Amino acid sequence: MPAAWDTTLVSQLKPDEESAAFAFAEEHYLAGEPVALAAIALNEVAFGYERARERRVEFGVLLTWLAAYVSSGVVEVLPVDERAAVVAGQLRARAPGAPRAARGDKRNKGQRRVAWFFDIQIAASAWVAGYEIATENTRDFERIGDLLAELAPAAPRLEVVPSPF
Protein backbone atom coordinates (compact mmCIF):
# COMPACT_ATOMS: atom_id res chain seq x y z
CA MET A 1 0.00 0.00 0.00
CA PRO A 2 1.36 3.48 -0.79
CA ALA A 3 2.23 5.85 2.01
CA ALA A 4 1.42 9.55 2.26
CA TRP A 5 4.06 11.80 3.80
CA ASP A 6 3.32 13.85 6.87
CA THR A 7 4.96 17.13 7.83
CA THR A 8 8.13 15.53 9.22
CA LEU A 9 8.93 14.20 5.74
CA VAL A 10 7.56 17.03 3.58
CA SER A 11 9.83 19.45 5.48
CA GLN A 12 12.83 17.47 4.21
CA LEU A 13 11.85 17.96 0.55
CA LYS A 14 14.41 20.42 -0.82
CA PRO A 15 15.82 20.98 -4.33
CA ASP A 16 19.36 19.76 -3.76
CA GLU A 17 21.45 16.69 -4.30
CA GLU A 18 21.76 16.06 -0.57
CA SER A 19 18.00 15.81 0.00
CA ALA A 20 17.07 12.13 0.28
CA ALA A 21 13.41 13.17 0.19
CA PHE A 22 13.87 14.96 -3.14
CA ALA A 23 15.78 12.01 -4.64
CA PHE A 24 13.08 9.60 -3.45
CA ALA A 25 10.25 11.75 -4.87
CA GLU A 26 12.00 12.18 -8.22
CA GLU A 27 12.79 8.46 -8.52
CA HIS A 28 9.16 7.53 -7.82
CA TYR A 29 7.81 10.14 -10.22
CA LEU A 30 10.02 8.80 -13.02
CA ALA A 31 8.77 5.27 -12.20
CA GLY A 32 5.17 6.46 -12.58
CA GLU A 33 4.47 6.25 -8.83
CA PRO A 34 4.32 9.82 -7.53
CA VAL A 35 4.74 10.32 -3.81
CA ALA A 36 1.61 11.44 -1.95
CA LEU A 37 1.78 14.46 0.35
CA ALA A 38 -1.04 15.47 2.66
CA ALA A 39 -2.23 19.00 1.85
CA ILE A 40 -2.23 19.87 5.55
CA ALA A 41 1.44 18.84 5.78
CA LEU A 42 2.15 21.32 2.97
CA ASN A 43 0.24 23.92 4.98
CA GLU A 44 2.46 23.34 8.02
CA VAL A 45 5.69 23.50 6.02
CA ALA A 46 4.58 26.62 4.13
CA PHE A 47 3.69 28.27 7.45
CA GLY A 48 7.12 27.49 8.86
CA TYR A 49 8.93 28.77 5.78
CA GLU A 50 6.85 31.95 5.67
CA ARG A 51 7.60 32.72 9.32
CA ALA A 52 11.30 31.96 8.88
CA ARG A 53 11.74 34.04 5.72
CA GLU A 54 11.86 37.21 7.83
CA ARG A 55 15.07 35.92 9.47
CA ARG A 56 16.62 34.14 6.48
CA VAL A 57 15.87 34.79 2.84
CA GLU A 58 16.55 31.18 1.80
CA PHE A 59 13.28 30.11 3.42
CA GLY A 60 11.38 32.37 1.03
CA VAL A 61 13.24 30.75 -1.85
CA LEU A 62 12.36 27.29 -0.48
CA LEU A 63 8.69 28.24 -0.16
CA THR A 64 8.58 29.48 -3.76
CA TRP A 65 10.28 26.28 -4.96
CA LEU A 66 7.98 24.02 -2.92
CA ALA A 67 4.85 25.72 -4.24
CA ALA A 68 6.04 25.28 -7.83
CA TYR A 69 7.19 21.71 -7.22
CA VAL A 70 3.90 20.46 -5.82
CA SER A 71 1.99 22.28 -8.58
CA SER A 72 4.09 20.58 -11.27
CA GLY A 73 2.48 17.16 -10.80
CA VAL A 74 5.65 15.46 -9.57
CA VAL A 75 3.84 14.60 -6.34
CA GLU A 76 0.20 13.83 -5.54
CA VAL A 77 -1.43 16.14 -3.01
CA LEU A 78 -4.09 14.53 -0.83
CA PRO A 79 -6.83 17.04 0.05
CA VAL A 80 -9.05 17.21 3.08
CA ASP A 81 -12.17 16.29 1.14
CA GLU A 82 -15.67 15.99 2.59
CA ARG A 83 -15.12 12.43 3.85
CA ALA A 84 -11.77 13.29 5.45
CA ALA A 85 -13.29 16.40 7.06
CA VAL A 86 -16.04 14.35 8.71
CA VAL A 87 -13.60 11.68 9.92
CA ALA A 88 -11.23 14.36 11.24
CA GLY A 89 -14.10 15.96 13.15
CA GLN A 90 -15.04 12.62 14.67
CA LEU A 91 -11.42 11.95 15.67
CA ARG A 92 -11.06 15.40 17.16
CA ALA A 93 -14.18 14.85 19.28
CA ARG A 94 -12.72 11.57 20.55
CA ALA A 95 -9.31 13.08 21.40
CA PRO A 96 -9.53 16.85 21.74
CA GLY A 97 -6.38 17.20 23.81
CA ALA A 98 -2.91 17.09 22.32
CA PRO A 99 -0.63 14.31 23.52
CA ARG A 100 1.95 15.14 26.15
CA ALA A 101 5.07 16.77 24.81
CA ALA A 102 7.78 14.37 23.76
CA ARG A 103 11.21 14.78 25.25
CA GLY A 104 12.89 17.81 23.68
CA ASP A 105 9.65 19.29 22.28
CA LYS A 106 9.95 23.06 22.69
CA ARG A 107 6.42 23.94 21.54
CA ASN A 108 3.94 25.40 23.99
CA LYS A 109 0.60 23.76 24.74
CA GLY A 110 -1.26 25.81 22.13
CA GLN A 111 1.24 24.97 19.42
CA ARG A 112 1.05 21.27 20.29
CA ARG A 113 -2.76 21.42 20.14
CA VAL A 114 -2.69 22.95 16.65
CA ALA A 115 -0.12 20.36 15.51
CA TRP A 116 -2.34 17.59 16.92
CA PHE A 117 -5.38 18.86 15.00
CA PHE A 118 -3.26 19.01 11.83
CA ASP A 119 -2.01 15.45 12.44
CA ILE A 120 -5.63 14.32 12.75
CA GLN A 121 -6.46 15.96 9.40
CA ILE A 122 -3.37 14.46 7.76
CA ALA A 123 -4.27 10.99 9.02
CA ALA A 124 -7.92 11.34 7.99
CA SER A 125 -6.92 12.49 4.49
CA ALA A 126 -4.58 9.55 4.04
CA TRP A 127 -6.96 7.01 5.54
CA VAL A 128 -9.99 7.89 3.42
CA ALA A 129 -7.79 7.86 0.30
CA GLY A 130 -6.43 4.41 1.18
CA TYR A 131 -2.90 5.43 2.11
CA GLU A 132 -0.60 4.56 4.98
CA ILE A 133 1.21 7.38 6.79
CA ALA A 134 4.99 7.71 6.48
CA THR A 135 6.34 9.79 9.34
CA GLU A 136 9.05 10.33 11.90
CA ASN A 137 6.26 11.03 14.42
CA THR A 138 5.06 7.44 14.83
CA ARG A 139 3.83 7.87 18.42
CA ASP A 140 1.11 10.41 17.63
CA PHE A 141 0.02 8.77 14.36
CA GLU A 142 -0.24 5.36 15.99
CA ARG A 143 -2.56 6.95 18.56
CA ILE A 144 -4.66 8.35 15.72
CA GLY A 145 -4.65 4.91 14.08
CA ASP A 146 -6.05 3.44 17.31
CA LEU A 147 -8.78 6.10 17.34
CA LEU A 148 -9.66 5.29 13.72
CA ALA A 149 -9.87 1.58 14.59
CA GLU A 150 -12.36 2.43 17.36
CA LEU A 151 -14.33 4.66 15.02
CA ALA A 152 -14.49 2.14 12.17
CA PRO A 153 -13.55 -1.31 13.48
CA ALA A 154 -14.49 -3.11 10.26
CA ALA A 155 -12.43 -0.77 8.04
CA PRO A 156 -8.77 -1.26 7.15
CA ARG A 157 -6.43 0.08 9.82
CA LEU A 158 -4.32 3.19 9.27
CA GLU A 159 -0.80 1.82 9.04
CA VAL A 160 2.01 4.01 10.28
CA VAL A 161 5.37 3.43 8.63
CA PRO A 162 8.79 5.01 9.11
CA SER A 163 10.42 7.31 6.60
CA PRO A 164 11.15 5.49 3.34
CA PHE A 165 14.43 7.36 2.85
Image: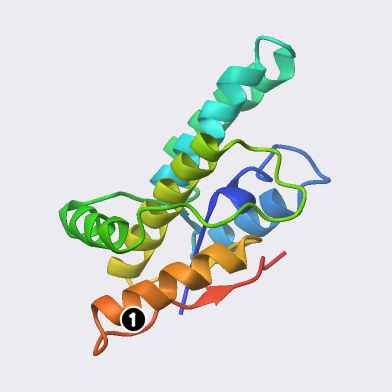
Q: Nearer the viewer, residue 115 or 63?
A: 115
Question: In the rendered view, does 107 fall on the left or right side of 32?
Answer: right
> Looking at the image, can residue 110 be seen?
yes
Which residue is located at x 56 percent, y 48 percent? 7
**Quadrant of the rendered structure where residue 102 is?**
bottom right
Q: Outermost residue, bottom direction? A: 154
Percent across and percent down for residue 19 are 77, 47
> Label 1 neighbourhood size at 10 Å, few (<14), some (14-19), many (20+)?
some
> Looking at the image, can residue 38 be seen?
no
Which residue is located at x 48 percent, y 70 percent? 143
Percent across and percent down for residue 80 are 28, 50
**Quadrant of the rendered structure where residue 66 is?**
top right
Percent across and percent down for residue 96 are 35, 53
Percent across and percent down for residue 71 are 43, 36
Which quarter shows the C terminus? bottom right
Q: Outermost residue, top direction? A: 54
Which residue is located at x 59 percent, y 74 percent? 161
**Number of marks present in the image shown:** 1
Question: In the rendered view, does 30 fall on the left or right side of 54?
Answer: left
Label 1 amino acid?
Ala
Q: Which residue corresponds to mark 1?
A: 149
Q: Nearer the viewer, residue 112 or 4?
A: 112
Q: Secondary structure at mark 1?
A: helix
Q: Is residue 19 above or below residue 66?
A: below
Which residue is located at x 36 percent, y 73 percent? 147
